[in-house]
Amino acid sequence: MAAIPQDLLDRIRTLERQVRELSGRAQTRPALDRIQHGPVVIGEGGTLTVQDADGTPMVYIGDLDIPRPNGAPQYGVLISREDGSLALAMFSNGTMPQGLDIYDNRGNTIFTEDRVNGGLAVPYLHTPFYPDGDLDRYARTQSGSPESLWTAPHVRYHPMLTVAAYAASDVGTTGAAQVYVDGQPWGEQHNLNSGDWIYVTDGPKLCPGKYGDVTRVEIRAWRTGGTGNVYTCAAGAIGTQTR
C-alpha cells in the first residue's frame, strides 16, 4: 500500500470539520423569506408585486409603465383592494410632480394633493360666511367707503379660492361690492347701477398665505351715489385645486 502523506489526512479532516461547521450555520440562519438586518434594494428596473391567493395584485412598487415626457421611466406605488379596484396611487400623468391619490371602490377620486402649488386638491372644502353687524339675510350699508358686511374665517387647505355672493342696490342708488382677503382687495370691484341685482363671483385665484393658515375673507360693499342702501348676501367661499 502506498504511503499517504500525513498532511493530506490532516487536510481531509480539516475539510470535513469545515463542512460540518458550514452545515450547522446554514441551519441557524434566518429563513429566505425573512430579512432581519440591513436594507433591501430592488434596482435596475426591478419591481415588487404582492398578490392575494387568487393572483390579484394588491401592492405594486416599481416602473409604472407611464414614462416621463422625456421618455425616462416613472417609478411609483399602486395599492389595490382584494376586488382589484385601485385604492391608492403615487404617480404623475404628465410633467407635474408626483402626488398621492386615493380612490373609492367605484373609481371616484376622494383625495388628491395639489401637484402644482401644494396643499389639498380634492375634496373641496366650503367656508360659511357670517354677517357683520345686523343679522339680516341681506346685510346692507350706506357707507361711502368699503364696509365689511360678511366675513368667513377660511382655512387655507387648498391653494386656490373661489368666492361667490349676491349684491343689490335700492332704486336711485348706485354702489359697489368687492371681495377682500386679509384686509386687502382680492376680487374685482363689481359696480351696481340703480336697482341692480347681480351675482358676484371671483376665482379660482391663488389664496394668500400658506397651508393651514386662517385667512379672513370679507365681502365689502359701499354706496357710490344716491341715498339708499347697498345690499349683499354671501353664497360661500370654496377652496379648490390649481387649474
Image (cartoon, rainbow, N blue to C red):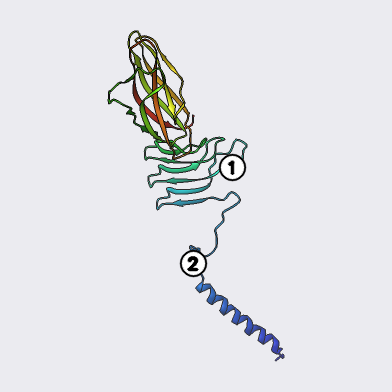
Q: Nearer the viewer, residue 161 or 130?
A: 130
Q: How many residues crowd mark 1 within 10 Å: few (<14), some (14–19), many (20+)?
A: some
Q: Amino acid at mark 2?
A: Ala
Q: Position of residue 213 (x, y in %)?
A: 44, 38
Q: How many residues crowd mark 2 within 10 Å: few (<14), some (14–19), many (20+)?
A: few
- The quadrant holding residue 220 is top left
Residue receiving disc 2: 31
Above-or-below relation of 216 to 85: above
Residue receiving disc 1: 73
Residue shown at the point (39%, 18%) measured from the top left: 222
Q: Position of residue 103 (x, y in %)?
A: 40, 40
Above-or-below relation of 67 to 37: above
**Mark 2 or 1, which is nearer the eye?**
1
Q: Nearer the viewer, residue 115 or 227?
A: 227
Work out whether mark 2 precedes mark 1 in sequence or the reverse, and give the earlier one.
2
Above-or-below relation of 37 to 121: below
Q: Amino acid at mark 1?
A: Pro
**Judging from the image, what secondary structure is the residue with disc 1 in?**
loop
- Distance from disc 2 to disc 1, alpha carbons, whole Å, reads 34 Å
Numbered circles on residues, count: 2
- Quadrant into which the N terminus falls: bottom right
Q: Is residue 78 left or right of residue 143?
A: right
Q: Position of residue 142 (x, y in %)?
A: 35, 17
Residue shown at the point (44%, 43%) measured from the top left: 88
- The quadrant holding residue 73 is top right
Q: Nearer the viewer, residue 222 or 116?
A: 222
